[in-house]
Amino acid sequence: MKICILSDSHDRGPMMAAAVAAARDEGAEAVIHCGDIIGGNTLKASLKLGLPIHAIHGNNLGDPVSIARIACHSEEQLHYHGQDAIIELGGRRIFLTHYPHIGHGMACTGDYDLVCCGHSHEAEIRQQANIGGGLTWLVNPGTVAGLGAPVATWIFGDLDTMKFEIRELATASATSC
């Protein structure tokens, strides 16, 4: 199963939708958003693309009531989990948090195949040694809004092969949505 992992869209709906559309065009079947969506309108263009979205809060809550209302009326397309989440996609156990330090800690437990975080606006993909003697994937997609970062980024992931790639958002795509 291929997925789109993004974070820190900060009310930049067209940029988020451009990343989701690019991932969908490459075969992604789901989206993970690691927080700082801000407002419900940020999600509208991405929801039109038809992929289920799993999202959490972040530290910039914006309008969580609006986002929760959209989730309630999305026919199970938007899953708004709150502070953090444990989900299963493609047979993989995944933990979502906004904060990198919590992501690091949860990766160390060995309870998850993949831990996704955001907040730092710095994209990173690495394997973290865990207490079970194995390795857990820890990914941070950076910021799809490009705020405080050289470029807007997101991650394309394949849960079957557990391969992840940092992608830069194409500027032309981001402005055309």
Image (cartoon, grey):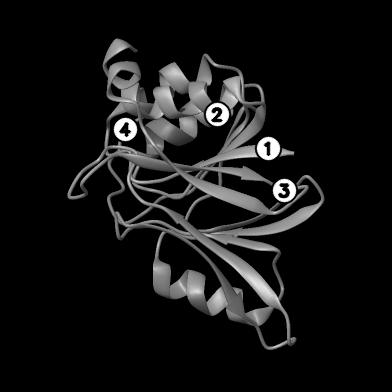
Q: Amino acid at mark 3?
A: Leu
Q: Are marks 1 and 2 in contact (CB under 8 Å)?
A: yes
Q: Amino acid at mark 2?
A: Ala
Q: Are marks 3 and 2 in contact (CB under 8 Å)?
A: no
**Label 4 neighbour load within 10 Å: few <14, some 14-19, many 20+:** many
Mark 3 vs mark 2, CA separation in Å: 14 Å
Q: Nearer the viewer, residue 112 or 153?
A: 153
Q: Residue at x 61, y 44 (%)?
A: 157
Give the residue number, with chain letter if any, for mark 1: 2
Q: Which mark is residue 159?
A: 3
Looking at the image, residue 130 lies above or below residue 24: below
Give the residue number, with chain letter if any, for mark 2: 23
Mark 1 vs mark 4, CA separation in Å: 26 Å
Q: Which quadrant of the rendered structure holds the C terminus?
A: top left
Q: Residue at x 28, y 24 (%)?
A: 171
Place of residue 90 in the rendered image (x, y in percent of width and height, measured from the top left): 78, 45
Foreground tag (4 vs 3): 3
Give the residue number, with chain letter if any, for mark 4: 39
**Label 2 neighbour load within 10 Å: few <14, some 14-19, many 20+:** many
Mark 4 lies on a secondary structure that is: loop
Q: Which quadrant of the rendered structure holds the N terminus?
A: top right
Looking at the image, residue 128 lies above or below residue 95: below
Mark 4 vs mark 3, CA separation in Å: 29 Å
Dividing the picture into quadrants, the one containing residue 151 is: top left
Mark 1 lies on a secondary structure that is: strand
**Label 1 neighbour load within 10 Å: few <14, some 14-19, many 20+:** many
